[in-house]
Image (cartoon, rainbow, N blue to C red):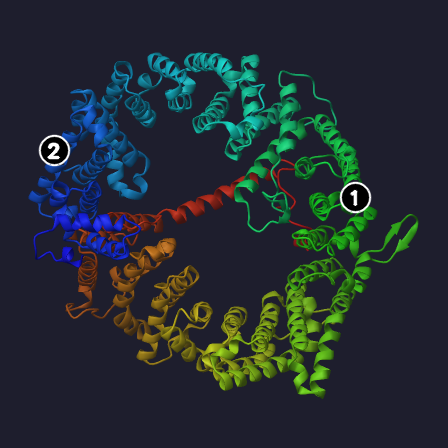
Amino acid sequence: MEAILDFSQPFNTALLDEIISAFYNVRDPQQQKAGQVLYALKEDNRSWAAADKIIENCKDPRSIFFGLILLEEMVQQRWTVIPPEQRESVKNYTLSKVMSYSSSMESIQNNEDLLHKWDIILVEIFKKEWPQNWTSFVHDLVTSALESESRCRNSIFILKIVVEDVFQFSDTTLTSQFSSQIQTALKNDMLEVYNLCTQVLVNTQVVSLLLDTIDIIRLIIKYLPDECVFSYELVDVLLKFITLDPFRTAAMACLHEILCHPSSSRFPSLVSQSLRRFLDYMKGYVNIEMDLKALWPTLPGELTDFINELTLFLTSVCRQHRELLEANAEFYVQLCEYILFLTRCPDREVLKLCMDFWKTWAHSIYDRFKKNANGVVPRNVDQPEGPYTGLTQQVIDITVQRMSRPEEVMVMENEDGEVVRVETKDTDGIALYKTMKECLVMLVSVDYTITEAIFMNYLDIQMQLSAQEPFRNSLQPLIWSIGSISGVLSEADERRLLMTTILDLLRLVQMKETKDDKAVVAGCLMYVIQQYPRFLKQHFKFLKTVIMKNFEFMHEKHPGVQDMACDTFKMIAKNCGSQLVVPQRVDGVEYPPFIQDIIVKMGAYMEALSPQQKDVFYEAVASVTKFERNEERRVVLVQNMMYSLNEALKAVIKAGLEDGAAFHTSEALQTVRNVLRYNRVVCAVVGNDFTSQLVGYFQDFVDLFVLYAQTVVAAVREKGEVATGYQQTRQEIIIKREVIRIVQTFLETYKQRGDASGSIVDLKQLCGKFLPVLLKDFSEAPDCVKEPATLQFLAVMIEKLREGCQEFIPDLLNSVYLSSLSLITVDRLKYSELCLSFFKMMENLSRFAFQFVFDFSEDKQKMLVDSIIWGYMDTERRIYECSLDTMITIVNSVRASNDAFKQPFYHSFLVYIMTHTLDCLTDKMHIPALAQITALLKILFSILMSQEVTQPLLPSCSSSFQNGVEVCHYLADYLIQKFPTCAPDVVNGYVLALSSSVNKTENEFKVINRDFLIQLKAVTNANYDLFADEKERKKQEEAAADLERRKQIPGLVSANEMPTDFDEL
């Protein structure tokens, strides 16, 4: 088989047929080898020259198709570097094949796959040749289409590819300038394409040709003049096709583009008449009284596609032309009834489209009533009957029935009917919930009376069901709907609704017999509790009842219930904590603050929880203590909360002092580990109020760190690296890490002000006591147990103390710098966490203590530069992003330093860093960091072109004034050698653009990089998203704008999105 890779011999097409046959035969013992040979052949830059022999001489159609793949990849990747005469030869050869295969309808049918591959190659050639050559490509296709029906069919197919490639997907396949030029040019050809399409629609009966023609009209509509788009003749033809089964969906999609065109509002008569004719047809085709939910599973694929397209059509047109349609309310209601019918469809995508429409519709109802009420939506007033009253009630009803699961609910029913914990975030479902919530909030704001009646009716139905009757799919959406309107109701309405709902749910918990059923009701109760903190704060008796019920749920060992109980308690703590730290009068009797009772009984409440769930519980209790305004009482609460933990720690220490082995029992290790993690959790919440706890037990924490550090080192030295897998050693490593994290957390959360006793913690002194122990352990520990958390702590300490940490830097660098550097340069993959922590530490050192970082010999400086470069060439995103940030910080710090330091640095490293940064840019694995790479390149080229460098950077530079030109030549040559299939003019133009654009904005600089990557993508056939960062930023901006919009209307922001009372402390 390997003989086929010997290009010194004539290409053996018969052997290729054999290899292809073996590859596609799963029983052939040579299949794997055949695959390897084919891959090697495909990747060889010389193989395309045999494409014509393969296509002409191979007998196996699969071999011919393989030859076409070779030819296509040559056009995509090597077109600009092959001689012009070869390009012309390939172009003519491709044209001849297209003409041959499309000579008759029979030929097309017999060779459809091959013909379409030739078509794709032809379009690729066109994209490479234009605009220097072949500007008549579209005209040539239209002319060819007039020759015969077979030519017409293939020309239409090619035109469809051109339109999709140029207008729909050009962002990621064409450079920004080329994309703009070709779109402008081709728009002038679209009228000619349109005229061809209109002739085809009336002169052919070939179904596939008609479908392609309708589809191409849909694609080019936005590029046509209005007189073509809004032609009654075109609309008449499309409406005729809508009545025919094969064309119904395609014609409706095309009509949708016309009626939703940006200029469609200028043609109200055409829009209105088209919709009336469309609705008349729908009345005879779709019966809105049928049970769509029951029928859906039995519908064939073409009908489900039709319903999807119908939903998109109706919702889009009714949204865009609402004002026009509302002029005839009866007709508008008829259209809305069809959308209401589609809203019952069980398909989630259809439901999403419908709910997006109802959300917009509900906003229009809300805005109308707000306008009529002079800017204020009236509350507790029955709204007058109107044309949409019945529709409003139906929309509310179906929204309540179909409400999607909110993010806070952690129990769900799986496909087997089992109630399980939610394991993955349902992003689509959460987005749908937010849409449905917004719709319901708008309608409830207009008329709560209707909504309350629906709620009460469904609650009554739930209470009348027997314990055995199915209820989950009706109860959960109901409760999610009730929870979704939090913040909308008046206090009286809210109190009436919640008292009924919570009491009914408490009864249902008792009524249900199976654990799964009880879990579902518990999830409903906890969810509704989370959504109404205002009600709970105003009704302490209810608040205490639901907290105690929540503690009961913490003992319910059902997937998701305990997690949700802990999260619910945390939300209550953060929203209602002010009610838990003050005495309360209940039924004439005054009780002490409820938090005191909770702290006393914490052990009992938490006994069934996992350590992770206890983390949440401690966080919740610690959050409540923050609501105590008196500092002394607040510190006492923290001390009381920590009492049982402190006693457990003391017991371990006491036993260990009596018998050293007691420190290393599994029970002792688990106890110490948990005590330390809960200390860290509490410290993160209470901040300064943790001072007395940390000061009181600091020495114990340090002693435990030293003890277990020594034990770990001894175990590794005795048993080798395998010891790190032992249960005992693993626990001891975690304990060391927890001690570091406690002190780190205190550094991060402590704010310089007096604690309860009026003293101030000297963070520098605290670090001075801890640092020697930490550094000694890091320097003495074997490589496999050097703790990344140590470097994380140092990064935080440097950022916190800033100038105050300078006296620690020499010892720090001596202990961790070179030892860490040697590890991550030898085996970056093995020490990935250490690598990440190291770069974060170096970034902070470069920012806050730069003068120490490069106070080393040049070879040590090179080790650092190399380690950062290796970091940003890593494949793990966290590492390469952190490394790029570190390099940006270092280069900026060098730039701000004096000439005595920066000139030698530039001479040694500037070109070196630039070269490797270009390597990073052109590595598809690093595309997500395009913005950071662009920022670094912009800084580097700014240094190069601004004459900051006063020494020659390359041997070819006779003076520093030549640096810019010579370095750019060097970088261009480097890239040309790296990408031999990319035209030298493209590379030279790219480097020139970088060097001449240093004063442009970062976004403009990024466009230059992206355009180059698009060209590289074409010649390397790589697959990556060059707009990922823009998409992510746009997504974040849209989310922020949406949150601001929702804040303007009461109830639109969910409880979990609102700042809690705790956040305002």
For residue 648, above or below residue 413: below
Q: Quadrant of the N terminus?
A: bottom left
Amino acid type of disc 1? Leu
Secondary structure of the residue carrying tag 2 is helix
Q: Could you say where residue 210 lies in the image, as x and y percent from the top left?
A: 30, 21
Which of the labelled discs sits on residue 96, or is there none? 2
Q: Is residue 590 left or right of residue 256?
A: right
264 or 209: nearer the viewer: 209
- Residue 52 against residue 625 in the figure, above or below: above
Q: 637 above or below 227?
A: below
Q: Nearer the viewer, residue 905 or 589?
A: 589
In the image, residue 233 lies at what x, y percent?
Answer: 33, 12
Q: Earlier in the sequence, mark 1 or mark 2?
A: 2
Which quarter of the figure has residue 898? bottom left
Specify few, some or many for label 1: CA neighbours under 10 Å numbering under 14, 14-19, or 20 or more: some
The residue identified by callout 1 is 506
Which residue is painted at 57% across and 30% down in the image?
359
Left or right of residue 412: residue 981: left
- Observer-side mark, 1 or 2, equals 2
| Residue appearing at x 74%, y 29% in the figure | 457
Label 1 element class: helix
For the point 15% across and 55% down, the residue is 4
